[in-house]
Image: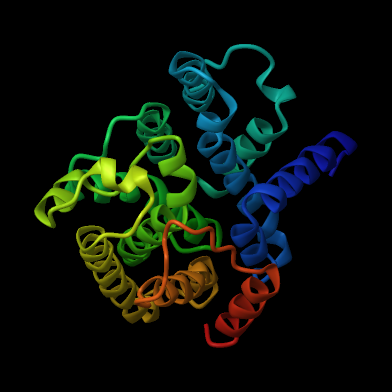
Amino acid sequence: MSGANQSSAAFCAELVRSHDFDRYAATLFVPADKRRALLALYAFNTEISRVRELVKQPLPGEIRLQWWTDMLVGVGHGEVDQNPVAAELLLAIRTHDLPVDRLSKLIDVHMFDLYNDPMPDLALLESHFRDTLGTLLFASAKILGDGSEASAHIAEHAGLAQGVARIIARLPYDTMRRQLFIPQDMLLQNGSSADQMFAGKMTPGIRATLDRLISGAQEQLATAQGMLADVSQAARAAFLPMALVKHDLAQMARPDHDPFELHIRSRLRTLWTLWRASRSV
């Protein structure tokens, strides 16, 4: 690689390591020649996912996201090549024929994050996970050599499970800024509400809602794990994060688990869990 290319690749690696350690750690268990493209993909996701945290109003966030959409379709504004994440992502897209339409959809879906509108129902939440986390898992499998329909199906199921674990883990952050991804219809069905969630205190209705989400996520995860034999050996490493999801969901399902308290999995636990999972793929 040239000096500029090395610098861009190193920038992406550090961005992911700092802001998305789970995915960074997972790249340590894939062939070295695939890590650069994976880190470019994950750096792109980090940039998109962090927009809400970097802006104070929705409009600047929409402008940022639109820049990435324009970049993907080839009408980027400004010096696209001077953006290390954009440059690395475009290289990964060209090298591995990544689905630009799905990456563009991922950006569009994250527009929802810029506002404090409640997630209305489970169907929309699942669609959100399919178009974001499911897309990332499928693109990861494609980088590792398997863009088959089987990989797409596993990515969808695993993405749904990963999404539930993520929104529950983020409850302390999201409720503090009065943003809620827990489906509003499920809360109402269980006699709860968004206001009770924002209060940050466990109620029977909140517990029932979270238990239902966790149970459904565990079923989705089991389905994905049961399908792993349908994808190539090399591509199975794309789904190593499922081991982390399994661990987190088990913790969240415990009766004494308080989702309104911050629970941070140690980096040592993350690496240990991924290492053990890598031994069985």
Image coordinates of residue 197 in percent, x first then y, are 31, 48
On the rendered structure, is 23 left or right of 123?
A: right
Residue located at (84% from left, 44% from top): 1
Residue located at (71% from left, 60% from top): 33
Image coordinates of residue 221 in percent, x first then y, are 34, 72
Image coordinates of residue 214 in percent, x first then y, are 30, 68
On the rendered structure, is 185 left or right of 252?
A: left
Image coordinates of residue 222 in percent, x first then y, are 31, 78
On the rendered structure, is 152 left or right of 67?
A: left
In this orientation, which residue lies closer to the viewer: 193 or 132? 193
Residue located at (32% from left, 81% from top): 226
Determine whether 177 is above or below 92 in the image: above
Residue located at (46% from left, 74% from top): 232
Colour scheme in the image?
rainbow
In this orientation, which residue lies closer to the viewer: 144 or 174? 174
In this orientation, which residue lies closer to the viewer: 20 or 6? 20
Furthest residue toward bottom: 280
Determine whether 136 is above or below 64 in the image: below
On the rendered structure, is 230 left or right of 95?
A: left
In this orientation, which residue lies closer to the viewer: 163 or 30? 163
- Asked where in the image residue 228 lies, by quadrant, the reply is bottom left
